Amino acid sequence: MFKLMKYEFRKTWITKLIVLGITAAAEAAFLINLYTNNENSLAASIGILTLIAIFGILVIGLQSVITLHRDMNTKQGYMLFMTPNSCYKILGAKVLENGLSILVGGAFFFGLGALDVTLLFAKEGQLNQIWEMVQEVLRTFNEQIPLTADALAAFTFNLLTSWICTVVTAYLADVISSALLNGKSFNGIISFVIFLALSWGTEWLNGISTRNIQDVITSLVIQGGISLLTAAVMYVVTAQIMEKKLSV
């Protein structure tokens, strides 16, 4: 399993390195603007760092889905399924590598954001305009999130686990398209509808599971746990299909 995870990491490390390089450049711009008191550019650099964090995590997940699609639809990738490894191991390596990458990446951006906020307040004190911007961003996701370290950590955990679940759901939809519906009319549309239905089902399950919970932090953590459990179920179903249809 560890060798397979290393193999998956080698296929995606360039993208991760590019994201890290862009982040380093944006962070350097932020620090320069902070210590030169360039408030307009400082606000812009904060916005850019936020976008990099969001899209960086999205790209890590999307690349994993694209890699699985290539493995299932190209001769070079298909050789992977001819190795003496079960589909459970092959898919498990993809899920674990991508899940760890998303969680580590999310923790990195969360820590970087906490450091930058600390530097902002240490340098300038109460920055009302920037603080209001941060609050507005959070309200677009959840109006009830308090601006505390625990709440923000729970919110980040919720987002990351939700994205992991979405990626694993996309694995299942792609495997259905490539292994079960390959060559049939509208297979892409059917698999996309399945993806939307499963994603809606996960959101519905999260909603009813935390409907009567008043504490926002507890609700976010429970929803994150449900997303991980749902991802585990999706993994087993996907691996079972691959085992039956792709094993040689």
Image (tube, rainbow, N blue to C red):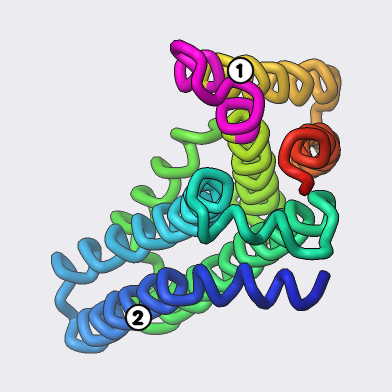
Name the mark on residue 141. none
| Kind of residue indicated by mark 1 | Ile
Left or right of 38? Residue 247 is right
Q: Quadrant of residue 83?
A: bottom right
Q: Quick check: can you spot residue 211?
A: yes
Label disc, if present, on residue 21 of the rendered structure: 2
Mark toward the viewer: 2 or 1: 1
Q: Residue at x 46, y 72 (%)?
A: 16
Q: Is residue 217 visible?
A: no
The picture places residue 161, in percent across and down from the top left corner, at: 69, 47
102 to the left or right of 248: left
Q: Which residue is mark 1?
A: 194
* Numbered disc 1: secondary structure: helix
Residue positioned 29% across, 55% down in the render: 129
Q: Position of residue 160 (x, y in %)?
A: 63, 50
Percent position (x, y) of residue 101? 62, 66
Q: Magenta stretch: residue 187 in it?
A: yes
Q: Quadrant of the N terminus?
A: bottom right
Give the residue at x 25% y 68%: 45
Q: Which residues are magenta?
A: 175-191
